[in-house]
Amino acid sequence: MTREEMAKVMDEIVVRMQEFREAGQREYAHREDNAFGNFERVGERLSLPREMVLLVYLEKHLDGIHSWVKGHRSQREDVEGRILDAIVYLSLLYGMVVDRRETEWKQIGIAQKEQSEPVTPHSKWEWACLPCSQERAKENGSDNPEAYLVTHPAGQPCPKRDQ
């Protein structure tokens, strides 16, 4: 396959993926304003986070893809459909990551106003300190403070804050 032909295939994937997502939204999400409604409802019933529910759904399609790659060609659903579903699920997972990050950053914004120090809940007993986490990330050549969380005991201010 040429690069130009592959570019056309990728364009087709994007169009078909959007169609799959829209059909899934109508069928499973129930509410137009919550793209993750199905995962959240099932998660509540099973006491699982929505991301774990999504992974279970994704694994079903990955299992079929693995079977196809290993030579099992007669399946209920064609492998192209399974691949598109997997892409949609991965896109939804990406959306969940973005949603969780935005929610956490909103919490940080509230904490900044209330406590004059940006913090986010890290555990029941500690707080992740955004300035220290940003500094540690920078020291490690990263712009992702979430990958380098620095915690302080709950209720104790950042020791660097007054420096």
Image (cartoon, helix red, strand yellow):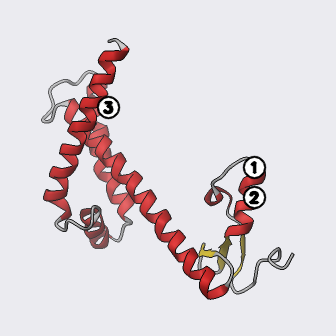
Q: Amino acid at mark 2?
A: Arg
Q: At 14% from the left edge and 58% from the top edge, which residue is drawn?
A: 26
The foreground one among 95 and 124 is: 95
The foreground one among 116 and 42 is: 116
Question: Is any atom of residue 64 visible in this view?
Answer: no
Disc nearer the start of the sequence (1/3): 3
Position in image of residue 128 (x %, y %): 66, 71
Identify the mark at residue 136; answer none if there is no mark.
2
Please identify, in this view, whether the residue under mark 1 or under mark 3 is nearer the observer: 1
Q: Amino acid at mark 3?
A: His
| Above/below status of 23 relative to 130 | above
Position in image of residue 55 (x %, y %): 35, 52
Which residue extends farthest right? 163
Question: Is any atom of residue 101 visible in this view?
Answer: yes
What's the CA distance linking mark 1 and mark 3?
Answer: 37 Å
Q: At 64% from the left edge and 76% from the top edge, which residue is drawn?
A: 119
Identify the mark at residue 66; answer none if there is no mark.
3
Q: Quadrant of residue 63?
A: top left
Identify the mark at residue 140; answer none if there is no mark.
1
Instruction: Tell me the quadrant of the picture where the C terminus can be found.
Output: bottom right
What's the CA distance linking mark 2 and mark 1?
Answer: 6 Å
Identify the mark at residue 110; answer none if there is no mark.
none
Position in image of residue 150 (x %, y %): 71, 66
Q: Secondary structure at mark 3?
A: helix
The foreground one among 70 and 89 is: 89
Position in image of residue 32 (x %, y %): 20, 65
